[in-house]
Image (cartoon, grey):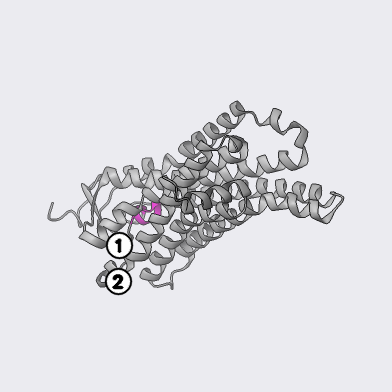
Amino acid sequence: MSDSNTTHFTNPSTFILLGIPGLEGAHVWISIPFCAMYAIALLGNITILIIVKRELRLHGPMYYFLCMLALTDIMLSTSILPKMLAIFWFNSREIDFSACLAQMFFFNCFTTMESGIFMAMAFDRYVAICDPLRHSTILTNQVVAKIGLAVVLRSCIIIMPFPLLASRWPYCKTNIVLQSYCGHMSVVNLACANTHVSSYYGLSMHFCVLGLDLVLITVSYIQILRAVFNLPTKEARHKTFGTCMSHVCAMVTFYIPSTISSLMYRFGQNVPPYLYVLIANVCHLLPPMLNPIIYSMRPKQVRDRFLWLFTHKGA
C-alpha cells in the first residue's frame, strides 16, 4: 500500500479529501458559516414539511412539489456537509472508495432531481394560471405522485454512469482529491486513463438535461406571462404572477450558482484552487438554505404558519 500513489490500482481503498486546499489552517473558522448554512437548511426544510403535513389547506399539487423540493434539499446538503464538517473539525480526510462513489452518485442525483422538481413546479403553475378550471382534474394526487417518481427515476438513470465509469478507471496518479467532497470530475481527473467519456458525459448531462429543463420552464413561463397580461386589471395581474415569484427566485438561486460552479471547474484554470472550492461549496449549499426562506416569504399560508411556529408561546 505504500506505493499506491505510483502504481496502477483499479480500485483504491481510500481517497483523501483535502477540504479547502491552501486554507487548512482556517478550516475551523470556515466551518462556522457552512455549519450555520446546513442548520438553516435543515430547520427551514423540515419546517416546510411539517407545515404542509399539518395544514389541510396546503394539500395540493403546488405544496406537494414544495415538499419534494424540501426533501431533496435536505438530502442534497446532507450528502456532502457531514463529511465536510468532519474534515474541518476532526481532520477526518479519508473516505472509502465505494463511499466516495456513493457520495458522487447521491450528490449529483439530488442536484438533477432538484432541477426536475423545478420543471414540475413550472408545469403546475402553467396549468393553474393558463387552464385553472382543469387544474384539479389534470394534476390529481396520482399524477403528482407519478411526476415525482419520474423525476426520481430520471435522475438515477442519468447519474448512474458517473460512478460506474469512475469505478472502471485505473488510478495511478494519486488518491488525493482537491475538494471537500467527491465531485465527479475531481475524482475522474485522478485516473491515469483517457477519461474523455466521463468528461463529455458530465458536460453534456449538465447542459442537455438541466438546459432542457430550463427550456421547458421558459416555455411554461412565456405562456404564463401571456395569460397574466391578458387579465383585465393590474391588481389581478399582480396577484396572479405573485404566486409564481417564489418559484422564479428559487430557480435563480439554483441554476445560476450551479452553472457558475460547473463553468469555473472546466474553464477557470487561472482561479486559485481554494477560491474555486469555496465558491463551489457555497454554490451547492446556498439553494437548500435559501429555498425555505424564499417560500416562507411569498405564499401567505406558508408565511403565516412559519410566523406562528416561531412566535407561538402556547403550551
Can see residue 173?
no
Residue stretch rendered in magenta on the structure: 181-188
Left or right of residue 313: residue 60: right
In this view, the residue in front, 109 or 248, is: 248
Does the stretch in magenta take in 187? yes
* Residue 73, horizontal then vertical, whole percent: 46, 48
Q: Amino acid at mark 1?
A: Gly
> Looking at the image, which residue sits at the far left?
2
* Residue 23, horizontal then vertical, whole percent: 30, 71
Residue 74 tag number: none
Q: Amino acid at mark 2?
A: Leu
Left or right of residue 214: residue 106: left
> How far apart in space, not on screen, are marks 2 and 1 (Cα)?
8 Å
The reply to whether callout 2 and callout 1 are in contact (CB within 8 Å) is yes
Q: Which residue is mark 1?
A: 19
Establish if 29 lies above or below 97: below
> Looking at the image, which residue sits at the far right?
232
Main SS class of the magenta portion in the image: helix
Give the class, few, some or many, for how many residues have Cα within 10 Å of label 2's Cα (few <14, many ≥20). some
Residue 179: quarter of image: bottom left
Establish if 293 lies above or below 135: below
In this view, the residue in front, 106 or 130, is: 130
Where disc 2 sits, the SS reads: loop
* Residue 173, horizontal then vertical, whole percent: 26, 58
Q: Residue at x 44, y 51 (%)?
A: 313
Q: Residue at x 15, y 55 (%)?
A: 3
Residue 23 tag number: 2
Does the stretch in magenta take in 280? no
